[in-house]
Image: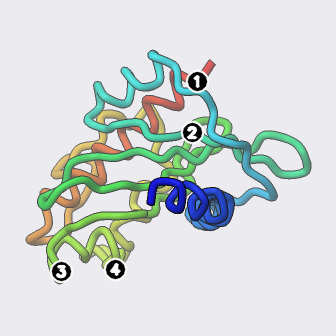
Amino acid sequence: VAGLLGWVNSITKDKIAAITWEKTVAAMQKVIEADDFSDAMELTDDMTAAATAQGGTLAAVYQAQSGGQPVGYAINVEASGSQGTISMMVGLDTEGAVTGVSVVKSGETSGIGTKVTVDNAPLPSGVPVLDQFIGKTAADQPLKVGGNVDAISGATVSSTGVTNGVNGAIAAFAAIG
Protein backbone atom coordinates (compact mmCIF):
# COMPACT_ATOMS: atom_id res chain seq x y z
CA VAL A 1 0.00 0.00 0.00
CA ALA A 2 2.80 2.41 0.88
CA GLY A 3 4.50 1.71 -2.45
CA LEU A 4 1.24 2.34 -4.30
CA LEU A 5 0.72 5.63 -2.47
CA GLY A 6 4.28 6.67 -3.27
CA TRP A 7 3.74 5.86 -6.95
CA VAL A 8 0.46 7.85 -7.08
CA ASN A 9 2.20 10.77 -5.35
CA SER A 10 5.03 10.74 -7.88
CA ILE A 11 2.51 10.99 -10.71
CA THR A 12 0.30 13.70 -9.19
CA LYS A 13 2.71 15.96 -7.27
CA ASP A 14 3.85 18.01 -10.30
CA LYS A 15 0.27 18.52 -11.49
CA ILE A 16 -0.86 19.59 -8.01
CA ALA A 17 2.09 22.01 -7.77
CA ALA A 18 1.20 23.49 -11.19
CA ILE A 19 -2.45 23.98 -10.20
CA THR A 20 -1.43 25.56 -6.88
CA TRP A 21 0.93 27.97 -8.70
CA GLU A 22 -1.84 28.92 -11.18
CA LYS A 23 -4.16 29.75 -8.27
CA THR A 24 -1.40 31.76 -6.57
CA VAL A 25 -0.70 33.74 -9.76
CA ALA A 26 -4.43 34.44 -10.20
CA ALA A 27 -4.58 35.81 -6.63
CA MET A 28 -1.49 37.95 -7.23
CA GLN A 29 -2.90 39.33 -10.50
CA LYS A 30 -5.98 40.52 -8.59
CA VAL A 31 -3.87 42.76 -6.36
CA ILE A 32 -1.06 44.12 -8.55
CA GLU A 33 -0.57 44.62 -12.29
CA ALA A 34 2.46 42.66 -13.44
CA ASP A 35 3.65 40.51 -16.34
CA ASP A 36 5.45 38.02 -14.13
CA PHE A 37 5.97 37.00 -10.52
CA SER A 38 9.02 35.51 -8.84
CA ASP A 39 8.96 32.30 -6.89
CA ALA A 40 8.32 32.85 -3.20
CA MET A 41 11.14 34.85 -1.64
CA GLU A 42 12.96 33.62 1.42
CA LEU A 43 11.25 35.11 4.46
CA THR A 44 13.60 36.83 6.88
CA ASP A 45 13.15 37.05 10.62
CA ASP A 46 12.71 40.83 10.26
CA MET A 47 9.89 40.39 7.72
CA THR A 48 8.00 37.82 9.79
CA ALA A 49 8.49 39.76 13.04
CA ALA A 50 7.26 42.99 11.42
CA ALA A 51 4.10 41.28 10.15
CA THR A 52 3.49 39.60 13.51
CA ALA A 53 3.87 42.88 15.39
CA GLN A 54 0.99 44.27 13.30
CA GLY A 55 -1.33 41.30 13.87
CA GLY A 56 -0.56 39.30 10.72
CA THR A 57 1.25 36.07 9.96
CA LEU A 58 3.47 36.23 6.91
CA ALA A 59 2.97 33.23 4.60
CA ALA A 60 4.83 34.23 1.40
CA VAL A 61 6.26 37.20 -0.51
CA TYR A 62 6.53 37.35 -4.30
CA GLN A 63 8.18 40.08 -6.35
CA ALA A 64 5.95 41.43 -9.13
CA GLN A 65 7.68 42.37 -12.40
CA SER A 66 6.76 44.03 -15.69
CA GLY A 67 9.15 44.20 -18.60
CA GLY A 68 11.75 42.51 -16.42
CA GLN A 69 11.66 45.36 -13.88
CA PRO A 70 10.29 45.15 -10.32
CA VAL A 71 6.92 46.90 -9.93
CA GLY A 72 6.14 45.78 -6.39
CA TYR A 73 5.25 42.78 -4.30
CA ALA A 74 2.36 40.41 -3.72
CA ILE A 75 2.34 39.43 -0.07
CA ASN A 76 0.36 36.47 1.24
CA VAL A 77 -0.54 37.13 4.85
CA GLU A 78 -2.95 35.62 7.35
CA ALA A 79 -4.85 37.14 10.26
CA SER A 80 -7.52 36.07 12.73
CA GLY A 81 -11.15 36.62 11.77
CA SER A 82 -14.33 35.80 13.66
CA GLN A 83 -14.40 32.16 12.55
CA GLY A 84 -10.72 31.37 12.12
CA THR A 85 -7.90 32.42 9.85
CA ILE A 86 -8.35 34.82 6.94
CA SER A 87 -5.71 34.28 4.25
CA MET A 88 -5.25 37.21 1.88
CA MET A 89 -2.99 38.49 -0.86
CA VAL A 90 -1.96 42.15 -0.57
CA GLY A 91 -0.32 43.98 -3.46
CA LEU A 92 2.15 46.81 -2.81
CA ASP A 93 3.95 48.96 -5.36
CA THR A 94 7.67 49.76 -5.12
CA GLU A 95 6.88 52.74 -2.88
CA GLY A 96 4.95 50.58 -0.40
CA ALA A 97 1.45 51.76 -1.33
CA VAL A 98 -1.29 49.12 -1.32
CA THR A 99 -2.45 48.33 -4.86
CA GLY A 100 -5.12 45.79 -3.92
CA VAL A 101 -6.37 43.26 -1.39
CA SER A 102 -7.91 39.89 -2.20
CA VAL A 103 -9.08 37.29 0.32
CA VAL A 104 -7.80 33.88 -0.75
CA LYS A 105 -9.45 31.76 1.93
CA SER A 106 -11.58 32.27 5.01
CA GLY A 107 -14.26 30.59 7.05
CA GLU A 108 -16.14 33.74 7.98
CA THR A 109 -19.88 33.55 8.69
CA SER A 110 -21.99 33.46 5.55
CA GLY A 111 -23.89 36.69 4.97
CA ILE A 112 -21.98 38.56 7.67
CA GLY A 113 -18.19 38.13 7.54
CA THR A 114 -18.40 37.09 3.90
CA LYS A 115 -19.56 40.63 3.10
CA VAL A 116 -15.92 41.53 3.73
CA THR A 117 -14.04 38.42 2.63
CA VAL A 118 -16.04 37.23 -0.39
CA ASP A 119 -18.48 39.91 -1.53
CA ASN A 120 -16.25 42.99 -1.05
CA ALA A 121 -19.50 44.74 -0.13
CA PRO A 122 -19.77 48.51 -0.42
CA LEU A 123 -19.35 50.69 2.62
CA PRO A 124 -21.89 53.49 3.25
CA SER A 125 -19.54 55.71 1.21
CA GLY A 126 -20.06 53.37 -1.76
CA VAL A 127 -16.43 52.20 -1.80
CA PRO A 128 -16.04 48.39 -1.65
CA VAL A 129 -14.65 47.41 1.74
CA LEU A 130 -11.39 45.92 0.43
CA ASP A 131 -10.79 48.83 -1.96
CA GLN A 132 -10.55 51.30 0.94
CA PHE A 133 -7.01 49.99 1.55
CA ILE A 134 -5.75 50.99 -1.91
CA GLY A 135 -3.16 53.74 -1.62
CA LYS A 136 -2.52 53.16 2.09
CA THR A 137 1.15 53.13 3.15
CA ALA A 138 3.26 52.85 6.29
CA ALA A 139 2.57 56.57 6.84
CA ASP A 140 -1.10 55.62 7.45
CA GLN A 141 -0.26 52.99 10.08
CA PRO A 142 -1.61 51.77 12.21
CA LEU A 143 -4.64 51.11 10.07
CA LYS A 144 -7.46 50.72 12.57
CA VAL A 145 -11.14 49.89 12.24
CA GLY A 146 -13.10 52.86 13.56
CA GLY A 147 -10.14 55.15 12.90
CA ASN A 148 -8.86 55.30 9.34
CA VAL A 149 -10.64 52.10 8.21
CA ASP A 150 -14.40 51.55 7.99
CA ALA A 151 -16.01 48.23 8.90
CA ILE A 152 -19.01 46.50 7.40
CA SER A 153 -21.82 46.73 9.96
CA GLY A 154 -22.08 43.41 11.82
CA ALA A 155 -18.71 42.22 10.49
CA THR A 156 -16.35 44.23 12.66
CA VAL A 157 -14.20 41.23 13.62
CA SER A 158 -13.80 40.18 9.98
CA SER A 159 -13.01 43.78 9.00
CA THR A 160 -10.45 43.95 11.81
CA GLY A 161 -8.86 40.69 10.65
CA VAL A 162 -8.41 42.00 7.12
CA THR A 163 -7.08 45.30 8.49
CA ASN A 164 -4.52 43.44 10.63
CA GLY A 165 -3.46 41.44 7.57
CA VAL A 166 -2.96 44.60 5.53
CA ASN A 167 -1.00 46.17 8.40
CA GLY A 168 1.15 43.02 8.49
CA ALA A 169 1.80 43.15 4.74
CA ILE A 170 2.77 46.84 4.87
CA ALA A 171 5.13 46.15 7.78
CA ALA A 172 6.68 43.13 6.02
CA PHE A 173 7.26 45.27 2.91
CA ALA A 174 9.13 47.83 5.03
CA ALA A 175 11.40 45.02 6.27
CA ILE A 176 12.30 43.71 2.80
CA GLY A 177 16.00 44.32 2.24
How far apart in space, not on screen, are marks 3 and 1 (Cα)? 36 Å
Circles 1 and 2 in contact, beta carbons < 8 Å: yes
Q: Is residue 76 left or right of residue 95?
A: left
Whether the residues at callouts 3 and 4 have beta carbons within 8 Å, the answer is: no
Name the amino acid type tagged 1: Ile
Q: Kindly indicate the quadrant of the structure image that contains residue 156.
A: bottom left
- How far apart are the two marked residues, 4 and 2, measured between alpha carbons? 25 Å
Q: Mark yes or no: residue 18 visible.
A: no
* Front of the two marks 4 and 2: 2
Image disc number at residue 119: 4
Residue at (52% x, 44% y) in the render: 75
Front of the two marks 1 and 2: 2
Residue at label 2? 61
Q: Which mark is residue 113?
A: none
* Residue 133 location (% of width, % of height): 42, 54
Q: Earlier in the sequence, mark 3 or mark 1?
A: 3
Looking at the image, residue 69 sits to the left or right of residue 64; the answer is: right
Q: Position of residue 31 (x, y in %)?
A: 57, 60
Which mark is drawn over residue 176?
A: 1
Residue hosting label 3: 110
Check disc 2 and report its element: helix, strand or loop: strand
**Who comes first in sequence, dot 1 or dot 2?**
2
Q: Nearer the viewer, residue 47 or 12?
A: 12
